[in-house]
Amino acid sequence: MTDDIIDVQAVRGLVETDPDTVLVDVRTPAEYESSHIAGAVNLPLQAVDRHLERIVSGVRGRMVLVCQSGNRARQCQDRLAAAGLRGAVVMSGGMNAWEAQGAPVVRGRQRWALERQVRLVAGSVVLVSVLASLLWPPAVAAAGIIGAGLTFAAVTDTCAMGMALARLPYNQPRNAVDVGASLDRLAVDR
């Protein structure tokens, strides 16, 4: 592992031995509500840009960034580093790795992970458009559009479909995340 990426065992060790370690979960509030690491602060990636100055100037202790697989956490790490905060590390494999190793989680209302929802919607549109093209050949264009969108998402490490799905009522938490309270928790001297 590099210095800016650490594995689940290292994170567990930090949480147990270093009271200044703060886990920042950058997933959507609904994903966080489904399952999260006890004590983790939910600060959705979408909120990071709006609060970069406060995060960079107020963080105390070691910051470990967590998402579902590690991709959004790396995006957050890049944004924080560009703003001047260089000490944040990413938990390799995210919550997928955490849960695969049997580490404890706090569970709430269960939902499919956003990445799984994107695969379902994209795959369904492609399948339906290909089948529809047997009757009406221009319908295959929808499959091409989805393919282009997925390619763009991979190249830019963003996902418009995921951002759209995150806004659906199904993906909204029962209680909205209080970004201000999350930011306050980051700045508390431990």
Image (cartoon, rainbow, N blue to C red):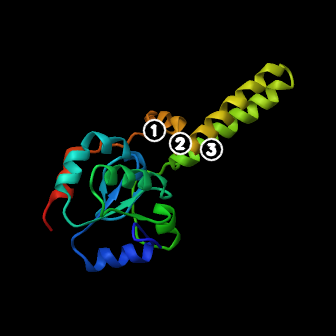
Does dot 2 land on a helix, a strand or a loop?
Answer: helix
Mark 2 nearby-residue class (10 Å; few <14, some 14–19, many ≥20): few
Question: Do the numbered discs 2 and 3 sit on residues whose CB atoms are within 8 Å?
Answer: no
Q: Which residue is mark 3?
A: 119
Examine the rendering and report whether any part of residue 91 can be seen.
yes
Q: Give the mark nearer the N terminus: 2 vs 1.
A: 2
Q: Which residue is mark 1?
A: 166
Question: Do the numbered discs 2 and 1 sit on residues whose CB atoms are within 8 Å?
Answer: no
Q: Give the mark nearer the N terminus: 2 vs 3.
A: 3
| Residue in the image at 45% along x and 71% along y | 2
In front of the other: 43 or 5:
5
Three-letter code, disc 1: Ala
Does dot 3 land on a helix, a strand or a loop?
Answer: helix
Q: Nearer the viewer, mark 2 or mark 1?
A: 2
Rendered location of residue 155, percent (x, y) = 58, 43
Examine the rendering and report whether any part of residue 175 can be seen.
no
Indicate whether 154 appears above or below 88: above
Residue 156: mark: 2
